[in-house]
Amino acid sequence: MYILVINGGSSSLKYQLFDMDTRKVMAKGLCERIGKGGHMRHTAAGREKLEFDIDIPDHTFAAKLVVDKLTDPQYGVLSDMSQIGAVGHRVLHGGQWFSESVVIDDAVIGAIEKCIPLGPLHNPANLMGIRACAAVMPGVPQVAVFDTAFHQSMPKSSYIYPIPYEFYEKYAIRRYGFHGTSHRYVSGRCAEILGGDPADHNIIVCHLGNGSSLCAVRGGKCFDTSMGLTPLDGVEMGTRSGAIDPAVVSTLCEKTGKSPTYVVDQILNKESGLLGVSGLSSDFRDVNAAADAGNERAVLARDILIHTIRHYIGAYAAEMGRVDALVFTAGIGENNAALREHVTDTLGFMGVEIDREKNLNPDRAEELEITAPGARVRTFVIATNEELMIAMDTERLVAAKTSKND
Ligand code: AMP
């Protein structure tokens, strides 16, 4: 079966086509600047790459372009649209409604709409992707895979904020957590590598990319995670502050005369983190290179990142009482050996020690154990693959629905 995975943004539509027999990506690409001009990139296995400007007025037009390219005799890999067995969508926020992926119907669309206040930028864009695919591929089953779903297993003590309880009851203000599909995939792979019963393993996953979050996974389920009501909480990120004293917001409003919305949406979400501290870049490669060259603010930005990652690792070790594995993933976690070495440098007390040579990952392995001989906790680098996880969920749910209907 071929499954199309869609990640709909407000002005973009990213896609990957999986052959589920081999679990390989057969084609992938991106339509961007939707509604503001338009540009498309498309690559398919064994085909010439394609990149061109084209007016893309809306997401439905973008979805049609995707299907056109996938079935194009020269650039495509499918002979006919009917070969697409199902479509899996990445959806940011499932609120308290969704603790797992679901086949999309009208009720699901209604619930995703109800979550718009919790994901005001992403959920409407995700819905545009869903509606576009429904229009272009009528009758093809669609599945929603939520970034928040994996974290719905957290105990109340992890997700209730210590503010008046009525705000949780009235407005559903609580910790939700994000990157759930990545944490589920990576912790699942780690549990497979560890072997035995996944219910016996306690794993800490460090998803370190442009956006970063850590997750404590106890017995295959999320126990705690560092992002909160929104993806602003937790460790220092590319442009996001991560956790700070909330009184910083009111103080900044007073000092700058800006509104709370401006302070949170602009300053804390877009001008802070590695960029805000270093004054140079939100990209860890740039900050790291400047820090290595002696730039003091870059050193500080890097030190804060290391400090905040360790802060959550320590907290999660204490919360779970035992850690069996520590995993690094995403852009920084997978690629930056120095950061992994810095972070783990002080973790010997809890049984984490890494092998410096293996940590360099000279072969650029996608899955690599970097544990030092004799260390109590096993440490891994595991490349995340949210798209494959979405494709696997989609295949499973569509097969279950088909067998129920038979
Ligand atoms: P992601 O959001 O997972 O795509 O990760 C983006 C982050 O990963 C950026 O901060 C990049 O600087 C960082 N990154 C990507 N490749 C590398 C690399 N080879 N070495 C260090 N950092 C990297």
Image (spheres, rainbow, N blue to C red):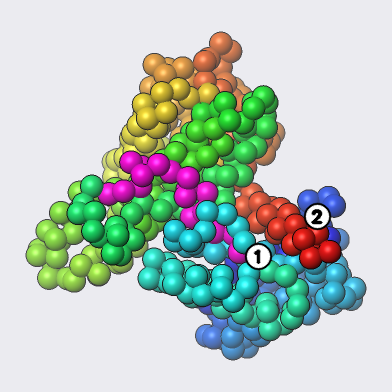
In the image: residue 406, left or right of residue 124 = right
The picture quadrant where one finds residue 405 is bottom right
Q: Residue furthest top?
A: 374
Q: Quadrant of the C terminus?
A: bottom right
Q: Name which residue type carries label 2.
A: Met
Image point (75%, 57%), residue name = 400
Image point (57%, 44%), residue name = 184
Residue 365 magenta: no
Q: Earlier in the sequence, mark 2 or mark 1?
A: 2
Q: Is mark 1 within 8 Å of ligand 1?
A: no
Image point (50%, 33%), residue name = 218
Label number found at residue 328: none
Q: Is residue 155 above or below residue 247?
A: above
User: Which class describes the residues within 10 Å of circle 2: few (<14), some (14-19), or many (20+)?
Assistant: some
Residue 289: x percent and y percent?
44, 43
Q: State the CA–CA distance, disc 2 to disc 1.
A: 18 Å
Question: For the magenta stretch, what is the residue range?
Answer: 143-161
In the image: residue 133, left or right of residue 199 = right
Q: Which secondary structure lies at badge 1?
A: strand
Q: Is residue 13 visible?
A: no
Q: Quadrant of the N terminus?
A: bottom right
Q: Name which residue type carries label 1.
A: Val
Residue 154 magenta: yes
In the image, which is nearer the foreground, mark 2 or mark 1?
1
- 36 or 130: nearer the eye? 130
Q: Is residue 216 visible?
A: yes
In the image: residue 46, left or right of residue 272 = right
Residue 385: x percent and y percent?
64, 49
Q: Which residue is mark 1?
A: 103
- 375 or 42: nearer the eye? 375
Q: Which residue is mark 2?
A: 20
Image point (19%, 54%), residue name = 164
